[in-house]
Amino acid sequence: MSDRLPIALRTYRLLSAAMTPLTPLFLARRLRHGKEHGLRVSERRGVGAVERPSGPLVWLHGASVGELISVLPLIERIHARDVNLLVTSGTVTSSGLAEQRLPRGVIHQFVPIDVPFFVRRFLDHWQPDLALFVESELWPNIMIETSRRAIPMILINGRLSENSFRRWRYLPAAIGALLHRLDLCLARTPADAERLSELGAPHVITTGDLKLDGPAPPADRNKLAALQRAIGNRPVIAAASTHAGEETVILEAHQRLRASFPHLLTLIVPRHPERGPGIAEAARAAGLNTRLRSRNELPDAATDIYVVDTVGELGLIYRLAPVVFVGGSLIEHGGQNPIEPAKLGAAILHGPHVWNFAEIYTALDQAHGAELIVDPSKLTAALGAMMAQPETRARVAEAARTTIAALGGALERTLQSLDPYLMQLRLKRADDA
């Protein structure tokens, strides 16, 4: 195909190249705010921190924690085929998860900033034979430079929200030129597939959501036991993956629920752990005794709010709390993942803004496997009802578990679609031997 770029992409490339001298300032600012890893900043400039392994290499990129968790089973299955894997992501929290959960031998690096020089340096070092991008990670310079090297690119668990679709329709030539570079597009849902096809993606297949096939999040046995001892027989509720604005609603609900549940403990897990101290400060300002997990504190008998501002510990929380409010849904964010609490037997509450997982929430709500809270003022009553009615809570949790199980199968369909490309890598390995 012609490599003549639309004017919007040419402008983007010129501006991003012109910004190269300013990237040290950009990275220094992010470092001050805890958004970069102090010892690995050079990776963001495309510098390979370790040697490239010999033989064919698959490069898989996911933006952050959620994307990385969703593809862990896929990574394990590809790795089991004796294929070299490089996994990149863009956040400090995702690097911590990668260190904990990636199979031994799989390399993790931070993705380079989308600047032509940094991207070319990254590709010069790693020379991947296949690139897999997760969900909606379509950085222009990365896609252009990768396609110019004739490296096959596949979008997996492809996602395109209605809002993003509407925005991209103002730049049809630009998004079309990017999507047309994909060899294959594996979409989460028929709606995602339709939107991606309409914007220009060739060879679109609906494979389902990989998040549905992932294992339940793990929990360290010793840490779980320590928390269980600290909590004892107290009633517990949790607010998971919360965003700014939602914690205030949770704190108000806690204060009201104490009249019916005097020993109530509320666990708050912010989507961005660095917000933990600010949440604790707000809780204390509301007269609530608060402790922070990032300071190695455990809740005691006087603790009202326990802020779990750590990475990779949702598995602990979902095993401790029988009722979970899933955040990002009372504000216009699009909702966070309900699959993990469903798999661990929690009764799920959520707000109305759940378009990131629209099909899953619709299925859960229709099966009475979750409860929609349209008005934040109704959250207190919904939490109280779930706490007071264990039989109802158990029915909701079981409906959620069976609904999620019935929606699975994306992992096998994704692997089936990737098989021809992975076979080519195995043949190449055999030829090089």
Image (tube, rainbow, N blue to C red):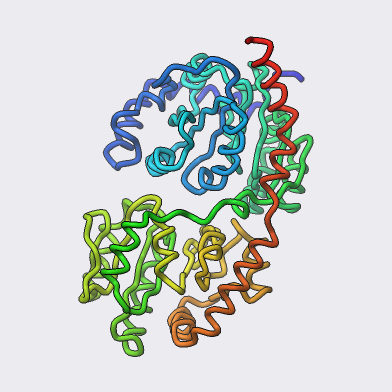
Tally of numbered discs? 0
Residue 121 x %, y % = 48, 16
Q: Quadrant of the N terminus?
A: top right
Q: Quadrant of the C terminus?
A: top right
Apparent side of residue 415 relative to residue 108 in the rendered image (left or right): right
Residue 6 x %, y % = 68, 26
Which residue: 67% across, 38% down? 171
* Residue 185 sits in quarter: top right
* Residue 235 sits in quarter: bottom left
Which residue sits furthest bottom?
260
Residue 60 x %, y % = 56, 32
> Does residue 47 appear in the picture of this structure?
no
Apparent side of residue 71 relative to residue 311 in the rendered image (left or right): right
Residue 375, compared with residue 19, is above or below; it is below
Work out whether residue 49 or residue 112 is closer to the camera in this orientation and state it. 49
Which residue: 49% across, 30% down? 106
> Does residue 197 appear in the picture of this structure?
yes
Work out whether residue 276 or residue 32 is closer to the camera in this orientation and state it. 276
Work out whether residue 10 or residue 274 is closer to the camera in this orientation and state it. 274
Which residue: 39% across, 44% down? 93
